[in-house]
Amino acid sequence: MAWYETLASFDLETTGIDVRTARIVSACVVELRGDEVVARRDWLLDPGVPIPEQATRVHGITTERARAEGVAAPAGVQSILEAVRGVLARGLGLVVYNAPYDLTLLAHEARRHGLEGFLPQPIVDPIILDKQVDRYRKGKRTLDLTAAHYGVPLTDAHDAGADAIAAGRIAHAIGTRYAEALPQDAMELHRAQIDWAAQQQADFARFMRERVSPDWVSDRPAWPGGAPDWSGPAMVLAD
């Protein structure tokens, strides 16, 4: 079975953009067969810290709502880890749009709450795939723009469920459209993405050093499994 026939997809909404300090506010894991959602699980967490107004403007979740309706962060993070581990154990590719952000943040949350982490694989990152199969297309590769390019509806951007579903459908669209150019096995695709992500980052770094500063250095987290800061099955990241 090709990896894009049945997929899981994962998304987080958080208190901020720094993967080391931001906390999870909401999360969703969905399962898709083709582009049809067949299962879905959602979480709302009380992150244990105030949710900045800027973050609330993005995802719409206030501190008051999170405290009133959300589960405590340690229990919520543990439940999310178990759900992610569960779909990966079934051999499904886990779609994560911009995987380094969500998975690195999840790893820091696991460590923060003393929970056992793991190296998530196989991962399917639509940004990496899209840049690989359509590398010369101009413009940004944000979720909303990429969804529009592949004809995927995204009606409630920055809702974890809506974003997870859209990311999964984008991955399915890429997989079917470019089947001959991509590995068909999920783990082979994962390993290929490690190399593609490294090359894409190197190309971007070269561009930034030529156009911005010769001393420019990326602070972007590594793609899962693609650098020493993913230290094996413990999924513990260096500060």
Image (cartoon, rainbow, N blue to C red):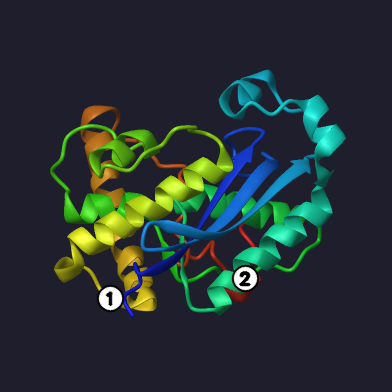
Q: Position of residue 11 (x, y in %)?
A: 55, 48
Mark pair 2, 1: CA separation = 22 Å
Q: Quadrant of residue 132?
A: bottom left
Q: Position of residue 53 (x, y in %)?
A: 68, 19
Mark sitting on residue 184: 1
Amino acid at the residue labelled 1: Gln
Specify few, some or many for label 2: CA neighbours under 10 Å numbering under 14, 14-19, or 20 or more.
some
Q: Quadrant of residue 128?
A: bottom left
Viewer-side residue, 212 vs 91: 91
Give me the residue at 22% from left, 68% from top: 182
Give me the residue at 70% from left, 23% from top: 52
Mark 2 element type: helix
Q: Position of residue 120 (x, y in %)?
A: 54, 68
* Side of 61 where 219 appears, left or right: left
Mark sitting on residue 85: 2
Q: Is residue 206 visible?
A: yes
Q: Is residue 199 visible?
A: no
* Side of 35 where 104 appears, left or right: right
Mark sitting on residue 162: none
Specify few, some or many for label 1: CA neighbours under 10 Å numbering under 14, 14-19, or 20 or more.
some
Q: Position of residue 221 (x, y in %)?
A: 49, 50
* Side of 129 where 72 appears, left or right: right
Amino acid at the residue labelled 2: Arg
